[in-house]
Amino acid sequence: MELVLAAGLWLDGSVVWNDVVSALEPLGHRAVPLTLPGQGDGNAAATLDDQLAAVLSAVDSAAEKPVVVGHSAACTLAWLAADARPDRIARVVLIGGFPTTGGRAYADFFEIRDGAMAFPGWTPFEGPDTADLDQPTRDHLAATAIPVPAGVANGIVRYADERRFDVPVTLVCPEFSPAQARKWIDAGEIPELATAKHVELVDIDSGHWPMVTRPAELARLLV
């Protein structure tokens, strides 16, 4: 199995996915952690289209239909990839996030200053998100956080192919439970997943960043 791994906001994928990749390789699976444009390559002018192009390049380069994994905000990137390549992707895995509804901004969560959305510190994430992050890990993630270019954060999400709803989806539930996620989906709060035909919900006992705090367990779930 081949997996394409897209990290969420502020994260250089080559760093946060390393332990997951190391856990997957002995199990015979190949994983490609992406360095998304604007989040590790120094491109402060990167756009949402640039990030999607990076995901699609990895999909197109795979020897077989890959599993596309998105974390947090990048769940939308993974779902956009399914929209662009519905016949080329075996499954989408969403970790701790949901696809943004079409017509809305990708991730306009915090203030844009000097053309970028900087990591806001840990205060907005206190609670279940960060309950399993010790201080050294918090310090490391904060120190390596990369401001997200405005062209990414404010990029408008646009879907075009309803065949994306045929692509199987697994939602990994870290700081929320599968029961909570099912309630949100059934209530129509997550329109893209409410319409998807094959949605599986699985639990992981972690905060928002299981690739950092539970990499071996996450790797087993991905397999």
Image (cartoon, rainbow, N blue to C red):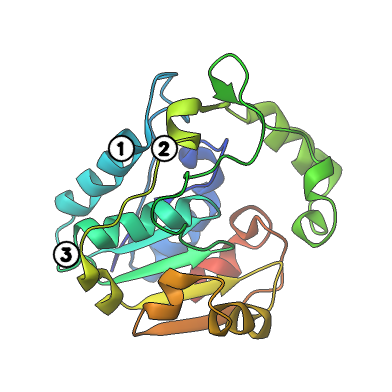
Asked whether the viewer can see residue 223, the reply is no
* Residue 190 to residue 36: above or below: below
The quarter of the picture where residue 67 lies is: bottom left
Is residue 63 left or right of 78 when viewed as pictured?
left
Residue 147: x %, y % from top left: 58, 26
Which residue does the numbered mark 2 point to in the structure image?
A: 155
N-terminal label among 2 and 1: 1
Q: Amino acid at mark 1?
A: Asp
Whichever of labels 1 and 3 marks the residue nearer the N terminus, that label is 1
Residue found 23% across the figure and 70% down from its top: 162
Residue designated by label 3: 88
Which image quarter is the N terminus in? bottom left
Q: Please give the residue where the numbered disc 1 appears in the rendered image.
A: 49
Question: Residue flagged by tag 3: what amino acid is it?
Answer: Arg
Q: Amino acid at mark 2?
A: Gly
For the residues labelled 2 and 1, the Cα–Cα distance comes to 8 Å
Judging from the image, what secondary structure is the residue with disc 3 in? Answer: loop
Asked if the residue under mark 1 is in contact with the one under mark 2, i.e. CB atoms within 8 Å, the reply is: yes
Q: Secondary structure at mark 2?
A: loop
On screen, residue 106 above or below 159: above
Q: Quick one: label 3, few (<14), some, or many (20+) residues within 10 Å?
A: some
Task: Say which element carries label 1.
Answer: helix
Tag 2 or tag 3, which sits nearer the N-term?
3
Callout 1: few (<14), some (14-19), or many (20+) C-alpha neighbours within 10 Å? some
In this view, which residue lies farthest toward the front? 103
Q: Residue 75 in the image: x percent, y percent?
A: 46, 57
- Circle 2 or circle 1, nearest the eye: 2
Circle 1/circle 3 CB separation < 8 Å = no
- Compared across the picture, whether 177 is left or right of 22 comes to right
Residue positioned most to the top: 114
Question: What percent of the width, then of the height, locates residue 8?
Answer: 53, 46
